[in-house]
Image (cartoon, grey):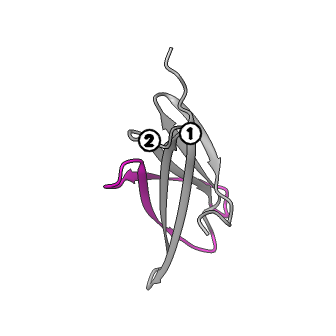
Amino acid sequence: MPHAPAFGDVDVQVGSRTDAGGELRDYVVTLKDAAGAAFTGADVRLQGRMADRRLVEVVLDPSSRPGQYRAEVRVSPAGPGDLRLRITVRGTTVVVPITPSSGS
């Protein structure tokens, strides 16, 4: 039976910029194991709910840095809100809520 991953650190950084279409948020997630080594090969997804309660999901792509995943998400007053990360590594999934202060 495979061992569940032991996350030592899940770091979320959120950048924001505005263009003609509204606000874009850049989500950068860095995963490290308990020994501080980069977690590679993870499936990382940002999930949230729109004002009408629809579930939305964005896949974060691996970046050039090992253990780092990134996605740019357009946001509006309609959402998404109630954000969380869904991280799957070696068949084990953990869900990490993203609080408004994450990345600040």
Q: Is residue 31 above or below residue 81?
A: above
Disc 1 residue crowd, few under 14, some 14–19, many 20+, Cα 10 Å: some
Mark-to-mark CA distance, 2 and 1? 8 Å
Residue at horizontal 57%, vertical 42%?
A: 8
| Residue designated by label 2 | 39
First in sequence: mark 2 vs mark 1: 1
Q: Are marks 2 and 1 in contact (CB under 8 Å)?
A: yes
Residue furthest to the front in view is 35
Tell me, for residue 7, which label it has, or none.
Answer: 1
The number of callouts visible is 2
Residue at horizontal 61%, vertical 69%?
A: 104
Secondary structure under tag 2 reads: loop
**Residue in front for this viewpoint, 81 or 50:** 81
Residue at horizontal 63%, vertical 47%?
A: 96
Task: Residue 67 in the image: state x and y as whole percent.
Answer: 41, 47
Q: Is residue 44 above or below residue 5?
A: below
> Of the residues shown, which amino acid type is indicated by label 1?
Phe
Residue furthest to the left in view is 64
Task: Residue 61 in the image: state x and y as whole percent.
Answer: 38, 52
Secondary structure under tag 1 reads: strand
Residue at horizontal 68%, vertical 66%?
A: 100
Q: Which residues are magenta?
A: 50-78
> Of the residues shown, which amino acid type is indicated by label 2?
Phe
